[in-house]
Image (cartoon, rainbow, N blue to C red):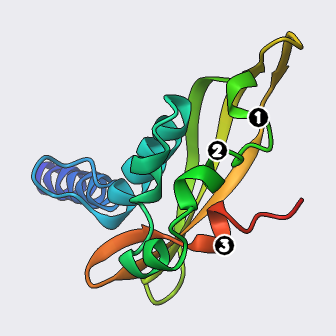
Amino acid sequence: MKKLLAVLILLAAGAGGAYLMSEGVLPGWPGDKAVVKRKSHRFLECLKFKNFDEAAAFHTPADIKARPDMPKLLENFFKIPPENLDIQDINVDFVEFDSTGQRAKAKTTCGVRVLNAKEDRRPEAVLYWKKVDGGWYLDLRTTLERGG
């Protein structure tokens, strides 16, 4: 009976450790999921504080070179003029990877207040990420080529 209990405890600890590792929350073990989640949050935080130059830096160097006007274009991410936009909270709802592990998507929801209209909204966005040379970068289509 004691052996069975010990085996069950070890299995539970192993499963818990595997889950924490997959979520990237183990200290010293940053998984891709944690990296994409953190970068998605930071990207939206840059938009919140109107730091459009840093928000542009989440794209590949090739994308930045191809679109030197990217910081200006990012001002329109929420389709609300930046001077009327007050982002109040940022949530990364989930992160999902394709079968290759080279592409990811992060579904986000932000609480925003439209100033001068006294209107609250909860826009959702899906940020698409791609792994390039070991680093995660936003796909340009996610941020600048969103449908109207």
Q: Earlier in the sequence, mark 2 or mark 3?
A: 2
Which one is closest to the eye, mark 2 or mark 3? 2
Circle 1: is it few (<14), some (14-19), or many (20+) Cα within 10 Å?
Answer: few
Instruction: Give the residue at the far bottom of this rendering.
Output: 100
Q: Which residue is mark 2?
A: 75
* Distance between the alpha carbons at the discs numbered 2 and 3: 15 Å
**First-in-chain label (1 vs 3):** 1
Q: Residue at x 10, y 53 (%)?
A: 28
User: Alpha-carbon neighbours of circle 3 within 10 Å: few (<14), some, or many (≥20)?
Assistant: few
Secondary structure under tag 1 reads: loop
What mark, if any, has residue 141 been given in the picture?
3
How far is disc 2 from disc 1 in space, using C-alphas?
7 Å
Which residue carries the number 1 mark?
A: 81
The percent coordinates of residue 48 (x first, y second) are 54, 31
Horizontal and vertical percent for residue 129?
50, 70
> Within 10 angstroms of label 2, few (less than 14), some, or many (20 or more) residues?
many
Res 117 quadrant in image: top right
